[in-house]
Image: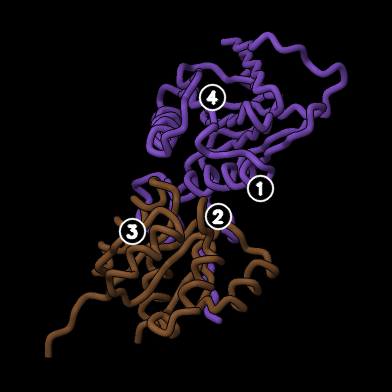
Chain colours: A brown, B purple
Amino acid sequence: MMTHATRILTVDDSPSMRALLLHALTAQGFHVEQAEDGQAALEWLAMNEVDVVITDINMPRMDGFGLIEHLRGSARHADRPILVLSTESSDEKKQRARNAGATGWIVKPFDADKLASAVRRVTH
Amino acid sequence: MSDLSGIPRSANPVRIAILQGDARASADPAVEFSTILGSCVATCLYDPVARIGGMNHFLLAEPPSHKSQTDFDEHYGLFLMELLVNEMLALGAAKPRLKARLYGGANLHERLAPIGSANAAFARRFIRDERIALVHEDLEGHQARRVNFQPTSGRVRCLVAKYDAVPTDKPLRRPQSACGEVELF
């Protein structure tokens, strides 16, 4: 049976963080696409398929909360795993993400093995 | 080493020490951030329109114990940079307007690995990759520095510090709270 590499869309406005994520996730065998904010992610997702979204919170144009709410409002993305990856760690922000429909929360600086493990858990 | 913008100082500044691992921002004209640097680097960011400034102080940490010990851990430096930028944005700064000044990264011990240069290179690369304007740098060399930064004016004073005033020149491991905690809902 043919299997494809898990496809991940990472959403982060920092080029440095995008480079770090690209390196860490491709090294773990994932196929990685990247968007620089929530708006760019929505535009990309309108035309493409993905298995899991990993998004930052603080971003221009559309932040991570807005992205999660938009995706959960669409039948196509209602069950898509969405992991938040943020420097924030307050219970209030986590609860807001959970209420918006996020699948999980990962605190930066991330550990590549833990991040990969979380991706595998939410996609299997 | 001094970098003066000509803007008068507050008569009685509220001086806040920025220690290794800290990232703070302020829009209060009375505040002055202060730090002492050996191998560490301090990034001073300033939004001249919003008149908001912030400073961090980092030393690239050794990776977690289960990782290779051969490289410095840029994840942690990136985390402190992002923390600083986010603190600035939370107060109303805009990333495209940010201007950066970089200080520190001295190589205090000739016999040891050039930790200061590694920190300086990381800071320069981050500022370049994030497309933040680098308006001044005072990096590397062999002397410790004391840096005072007024966040609402962007004014910086950087002076040579006594070697024994530098609190530490060894990279620290990531704090336990900074190891990528995962919580699935």
Query: B71 above or below A33?
Result: above
> Mark 4 belongs to which subunit?
B
Q: Residue B23: in sight, yes or no? A: no
Q: Residue at x 54, y 68 (%)?
A: B181
B24 horizontally vs A35: left or right: right
Disc nearer the start of the sequence (1/4): 1
Reading the image, the residue beneath label 1 is: B90
Q: Residue at x 51, y 41 (%)?
A: B171
Secondary structure of the residue carrying tag 1 is helix
Given the image, on which type of amino acid does mark 3 rest?
Gln
Q: Which labelled disc corresponds to residue A34?
A: 3
Q: Which labelled disc corresponds to residue A58?
A: 2
Secondary structure of the residue carrying tag 2 is loop
**Does mark 3 fall on the same chain as mark 4?**
no
Reading the image, the residue beneath label 4 is: B101
> Mark 3 belongs to which subunit?
A
> Mark 1 belongs to which subunit?
B
Query: B127 above or below B143?
Result: below
Can you give x and y, in whole percent of width and height, for residue A98 in the image?
59, 77
